[in-house]
Amino acid sequence: MNPSYAAGNSKGAAVQNNPDTTLITPDAPVAATTHGGRAKCLQRLVRLDLPVPRTVALSFDAVHQIAEGQLPDIDAILGEFNPTSLLCVRPSSEDPDWGGPGAVLNIGMNDARYVDLCDTLGPTAAAALYLRFVQTYAVHVARLDPDVFDDVVEEGPQGLSEMLHAYETETDEVFPQEPGEQLGAVLRTMARAWEGTSARLLRQAKGAPADAGLGLVVQEMIPGLGLGESGSGVLQLANSTTGLPQITGRYLSQSQGRDALGAGAPSLYLGCDPRGPSLEEKAPGAFDDLKTHAALMREKLREEMQVEFVIENGSVHILDGVRVQRSSRAAVRIAVRLAQDGIIPEQEAVMRVDPHTLNELLHRQVDPEAERDVLTTGIAASPGAATGKIVFTSAEAQASAARSEPCILIRRETSPEDIRGMHAAVAVLTEKGGITSHAAVIGRGMGLPCIVGASGLRFQTKKKALMAPDGRIFKTGDVLTIDGTSGQVLVGEPAMLEAALDDSFQTLMGWADKERDIGIRANADTPADAQTARNFDAQGIGLCRTEHMFFEPGRLTVMREMIFAETSSGRAAALERLLPMQRDDFTQLFRIMQGKPVCIRLFDPPLHEFLPATRTGQRELAEALDLQVSDVTRRVEAMSEYNPMLGLRGVRLGVTVPEIYDMQARAIFEATLEASKHGAAVVPEVMIPLVSAKREVELVKARIDTVAAAVASEMGTDFDYRLGVMMETPRACLRADEISPNTAFLSFGTNDLTQMTYGLSRDDAGRFMSAYVQQGVFTEDPFHVLDTEGVGELLKLGAERGRAAQPNVTLSICGEHGGNPESIAFCRDAGFDYVSCSPFRVPVARLAAAQLAIAHKLGGDP
Ligand code: PEP
Ligand code: MG
């Protein structure tokens, strides 16, 4: 061990015996939970025999007492250090991310020491050290206004005497000369700063508990100023943005603390760099030592660390190590590289990446460094960011796409009629809606950035204008950016980061899948969705909402003809034309999924959703059907319902207009035989939506079995299929015991189930949800995070009763909650077989599920 760092000498005894002030030695009783993360990290560095200056750690209790006015034995602390050393005090909160008061350097500087240091370091360096201390002390400890020193323009000895003079004039006292008095005052200030209201709120916002403690470390200063090559800097071995191995950081000769990182500082690069001079060229020996120390820290601390160092006359000292700050993509690469280098096991790499942050990798994002001109914040409904010219109708969006001009579709709310516009747009912004409203669900399915419920803006869709709270007006063609990850609507075009599905991501996902013990499927409605699901390694399709297929150009009119048909033969003719279209859709889905299960939900929404809502749309339909506009309008009015979400939809259509389900079943079975010809045998899953009574299932099942038998006999080939029920009404959950014997699977549709359990409209709740969450009525938006207490209770009841009556029934969830890590934990605990979520959330779900399985194996929480 380097003798200057030997900590276990007799002096240590006084401090060691005091549980509140502990000299950091390899075996001193120091823990992150009692002394903070920095103190613990320093002890680890001491154990590695690294050149760490002597340090005394003050416990959370000691610092709390200091804040209350009871100082520890300051003489005992000072007794730990060489009387000629300067000291610094730095914060040590339990989790370094919780922050703490700024460090105070050069404690112990006084007139006498200044004179001594003028001899050893030279007057310029000595004055700089003293000046820095007086300034910090004056502002933070004596709480003087920084303006007091406005007139001090000189540096060096002259500046110092001006500053001391200004201090004396302002306080009517000479600058404190006693190191003990200085140290006591600094400790008191830092301890009280931590107890202050704003500091408390700030750290609570970062997840700290209300009673989080602060430790402090008192460390011997290595000045970084003076003779020979002296200075300070920081170094890390990985790039914070990409996670790739790269020595990054800066070094500044004749500097202290983090001066090297200051804007405009004439700092050096670390390794040789074409952009300018480097530490490697200036002090190659020190550079080599630093690299070796950093590599040792990485290996032994099992983490990518940023090293804070000082060079004193050519030799390196390590002051501190902090976890490298990292973007989400860097977090993945760093975890994978640590595992590949044998430093941590693969399982631990999987545990180290927060699944929520994967969203940032899967989509383009606004560069975190970019400046943001935030117009308003709405509900972040579908992650990712995109910039485009704003348009107010789907037709404009399509025209814009035809000109290859990226556009943002702005609507009060979207309806199925807007699907084509959404396909043409790069992002969507709506005034109304919540996390499960139309725009949100479709946006997530398509990977299209989307903000809903942006009620802070005035949507003047007729005038084609958006008015911001600050009075700015945006019209068609103006450029905005939608940040669907944060919910911010931004003016202009900030810098973006591209999606990063790189090799590290794939490796991490592979490791996650080895651990996972619950299936992950995707909700996919179109071949494009299915392809995305495959690309993200979904284990099947858990929900294909077939109605979305009817919005393709050319189909809507046929669909409308079917709806308008007055007679059963008229309806049959329209369905006859829809059949081959649906058959093609399903054949494609089966082919893309290559034998993996595909669960197709029969038609669900109220029919009138397919009818044109606007005057122009109604005129077009009248033209197509050779009717009067008034006929169309009357029919649309006749079909409208007071409460369509609770009206004639789902299985109720299947019971009252059974031909639609007959056609869909036939299309599914014909596609099954078609796709099975050239690939793995397909076993389709057919799902009945919105069931609330056993008899509904019996009626539909009887007809579907008949269609299956007819198709098998016409084609001369038998096939298997599985029939299941979508559990999305409270009654279905309560009566699951009588429903499940008729089914192969029960899939919980938690969007509608949440809506019906709360009696809360999924399309309108966004208007007041934030007020409800702010006032603590709901802890979270229940459409976003599964309400395990209420809706969850129904899920558990349904699962238990369903399984009791039919032990082999497959259980799953296919509402938007399926991709949410917290909801996956609930479903896993309840013994579900799989969860199904938007294709772009499949990786998030795979990682979250793996973490649950690993935590379970290790016997703790993730
Ligand atoms: C549900 O209700 O949870 C569901 C998945 O169906 P949809 O969102 O299509 O109503
Ligand atoms: Mg539903």
Image: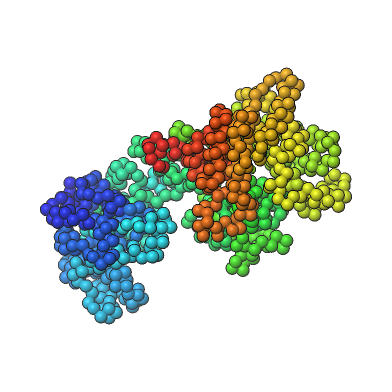
Where residue 632 appears, as percent x and y from the top left, is 83, 49
Q: Looking at the image, which residue sits at the far top?
A: 716
Where residue 835 appears, as percent x and y from the top left, is 54, 37
- Residue visible at 88% across and 50% down in the picture: 628
Q: Nearer the viewer, residue 671 or 856?
A: 856
Residue 704 found in image quarter: top right
Q: Nearer the viewer, residue 245 or 795?
A: 795
- Residue visible at 76% across and 38% down in the picture: 656
Q: Nearer the viewer, residue 170 or 622?
A: 622
Whether residue 795 is visible: yes
Q: Looking at the image, which residue sits at the far left?
A: 10
Q: Is residue 112 above or below residue 214?
A: below
Specify whether 821 is left or right of 476: left
Whether residue 282 is visible: no
> Whereabouts is ligand 2, in terms of quadrant?
top right
Where residue 129 appears, as percent x and y from the top left, is 25, 66
Specify whether 255 is left or right of 359: left
Q: How many numbered badges does the structure rendering display? A: 0
On-image quarter of the C terminus? top left
Specify whether 305 is left or right of 453: left
Where residue 257 appears, as percent x and y from the top left, is 30, 60
- Residue visible at 57% across and 37% down in the picture: 798
- Residue visible at 48% across and 55% down in the picture: 368
Q: Nearer the viewer, residue 227 or 816?
A: 816
Q: How is the image coloured?
A: rainbow
